[in-house]
Image: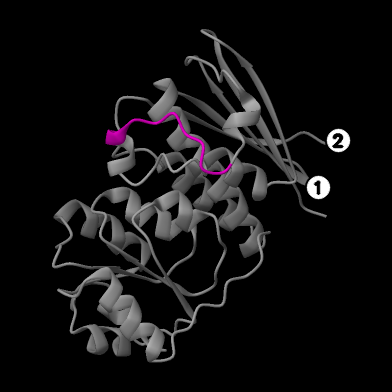
Amino acid sequence: MKITTIRDLLNAEVYCNEENLGRHVYSACGSDMMSDVLAYVKDQAVLLTGLMNQQVIRTAEMMDMVCVVFVRSKKPSPDMIDLAEETGIVVMATDKTMYEACGILYSSGLIKERKANV
Amino acid sequence: MSEALVFHFDVDGDNFTSAGQASVQVKKDLRQLGLPTDIIRRISIAMYEGEINMVIHANGGTADVLVYEDAIEIILEDHGPGIADIDKAMQEGYSTASDTIRSLGFGAGMGLPNMKRYTDSMDIKTKLGVGTTITMRIELA
């Protein structure tokens, strides 16, 4: 799925790295606990979260994720956007809840492919 | 074994916001060395979890990444409270982190298990009231 499709499906506002909206993603994960996110290696993934701090961006960067979606109408702070800008990660925010956002992406074909633990 | 290339970092224990900066830098440094992506990812995740642990439990410490021809070693050293029960600490879901830390997205009890998961070997030396040194190794061969 292209990141632009995610933006459209979630009616999300994009905050940085618009030039990467054409990239493809193959899996997604939704969590507010970053260590749970870090427990599974995925390629080209999207992170959906309601957590708001810079560690969200760092976690996504460590995982080589390409897109972060903030749910429940939370807007990323300028320092989070600055951090994300350096990484190329597309950051967006939607007014949908975590459950709703994940459900929409899943039913639209973004089905997780959870690799076995390394 | 030939001499290792060493990257040294001081991890600031007072600042949760900056936690992870060393891991970000290591990721960049290892990319410049041309290591495979999956190896770099494993190293940076393991180190990131370790760095977060040092900030939330031990008021910071030092991190050294040693690059050998056939392996990478990450040595994390702190002078924090030490780990009372390593077996428990290695259980997924066990954590002594405060609610404040949990509200920041960590303290799920996955830190040490994740560090072990992503590395080929992990050694923990800890003494209560003195500190903890964790050595992780990832083979390149």
Q: Quadrant of residue A92?
A: bottom left
Q: Are marks 2 and 1 on the same chain?
A: yes
Is residue B95 shown in magenta? yes
Residue located beneath label 1 in the image: B70
- Identified at 44% across, 91% down, the residue is A109
The disc labelled 1 sits on which kind of residue?
Answer: Asp
Residue located beneath label 2 in the image: B1
Chain under callout 1:
B
Query: Above or below — where is A70 with respect to B62?
Result: below
- Identified at 63% across, 26% down, the residue is B86
Q: How is the image coloured?
A: one colour
Query: Above or below — where is B134 with respect to A40?
Result: above
* Quadrant housing the C terminus of chain B: bottom right
The percent coordinates of residue A41 (x first, y second) are 57, 63
Is residue B88 shown in magenta? no
Is disc 2 in contact with disc 1, using a CB cutoff of under 8 Å? yes
